[in-house]
């Protein structure tokens, strides 16, 4: 990780707090002792902060570098556990995954068994809206999803979603994060960027177009990010 990567992580953390309504650009400037335009340019990637300026922003928000680093850079190695309990994850339709905070038994198409540690070792970054939703569920990728994301997804693949990760902060350094995204009435599995008020939905296959999803003034990316694809189970 270099200094530019650290800038991006700090920017995304601040942007997430602004999305949740707990912070404003003006407040950041006041707390860190900057002009508001200076902070606005930083948040919009138009200029960088000096090392001293970055320290001032972190200190003003009671943040440490360890708190914003992706998981694999901060987690210490843990010894193997003597037991590994299993959890049952419901497989549901795309519409249920997008709209149902609680998953009723009638909505379950099938179930899969997953190691509990594999689920709960995932780091969460829930939006206010999704914080109380049932966290883990799965969807079976349809032919269009597979075609756009092959070989990340294969025919018959089941994508397990963490609906408590609705942030654009990268989950792993230097790797794109695969999200389930609300796109009209459809649910798309795509890599996602955000720029100039638009979500940029990127397929893996070059044969599929990049799609742009403009946000209204009152909307945030978390309104469309249903969750992170934490792993994929493929049929043999």
Image: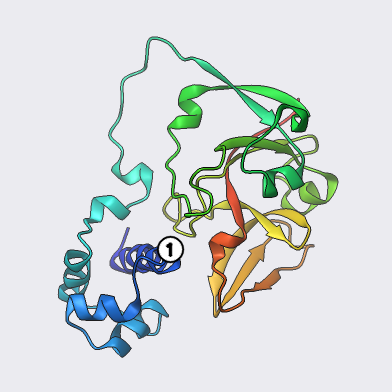
Q: Could you tell me residue 149's position as x and y percent?
A: 72, 51
Horizontal side of 135 relative to 18 (left or right) equals: right
The image shows residue 194, relative to residue 94, as above or below, that is: below
Q: In the image, what residue occupies the spot 73% across and 53% down?
A: 187
Residue 47 appears in view: no
Q: For numbered disc 1, what is the local secondary structure?
A: loop
Q: Could you tell me residue 139's position as x and y percent?
A: 72, 38
Horizontal side of 114 relative to 103 (left or right) equals: left
Q: Could you tell me residue 95's position as x and y percent?
A: 76, 47
Residue 44 appears in view: yes
Horizontal side of 25 relative to 219 (left or right) equals: left
The image shows residue 83, relative to residue 93, as above or below, that is: above
Label 1 crowd bin: few (<14), some (14–19), many (20+), radius 10 Å:
some
**Which quadrant of the figure contains the N terminus?**
bottom left
Q: Could you tell me residue 41's position as x and y percent?
A: 36, 85
Instruction: Quickly name the residue at label 1.
Output: 20
Q: In the image, what residue occupies the spot 24% across and 56% down?
A: 65
The image quadrant that residue 4 belongs to is bottom left
Q: In the image, what residue occupies the spot 57% across and 37% down?
A: 134
**Which quadrant of the figure contains the C terminus?**
top right
Q: Find the residue positioned furthest to the top.
A: 82
Q: In the image, what residue occupies the spot 55% across and 65% down?
A: 221
190 or 105, which lies in front? 105
């Amino acid at each position: 990780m270099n200094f530019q990567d650290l800038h991006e992580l700090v920017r995304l953390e601040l942007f997430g707090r602004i999305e949740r309504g707990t912070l404003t650009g003006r407040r950041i400037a006041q707390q860190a002792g900057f002009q508001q335009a200076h902070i606005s340019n930083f948040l919009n990637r138009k200029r960088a902060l000096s090392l001293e300026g970055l320290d001032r922003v972190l200190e003003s928000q009671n943040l440490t570098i360890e708190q914003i680093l992706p998981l694999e850079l901060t987690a210490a190695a843990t010894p193997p556990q003597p037991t590994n309990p299993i959890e049952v994850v419901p497989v549901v339709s795309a519409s249920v995954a997008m709209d149902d905070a609680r998953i009723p038994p009638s909505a379950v198409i099938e179930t899969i068994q997953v190691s509990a540690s594999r689920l709960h070792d995932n780091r969460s970054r829930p939006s206010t809206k999704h914080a109380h939703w049932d966290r883990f569920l799965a969807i079976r990728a349809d032919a269009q999803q597979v075609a756009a994301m092959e070989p990340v997804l294969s025919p018959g693949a089941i994508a397990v979603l963490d609906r408590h990760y609705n942030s654009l902060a990268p989950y792993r350094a230097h790797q794109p994060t695969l999200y389930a995204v609300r796109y009209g009435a459809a649910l798309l599995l795509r890599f996602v960027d955000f720029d100039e008020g638009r979500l940029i939905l990127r397929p893996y296959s070059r044969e599929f177009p990049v799609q742009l999803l403009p946000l209204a003034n009152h909307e945030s990316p978390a309104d469309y990010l249903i969750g992170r694809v934490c792993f994929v189970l493929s049929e043999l």
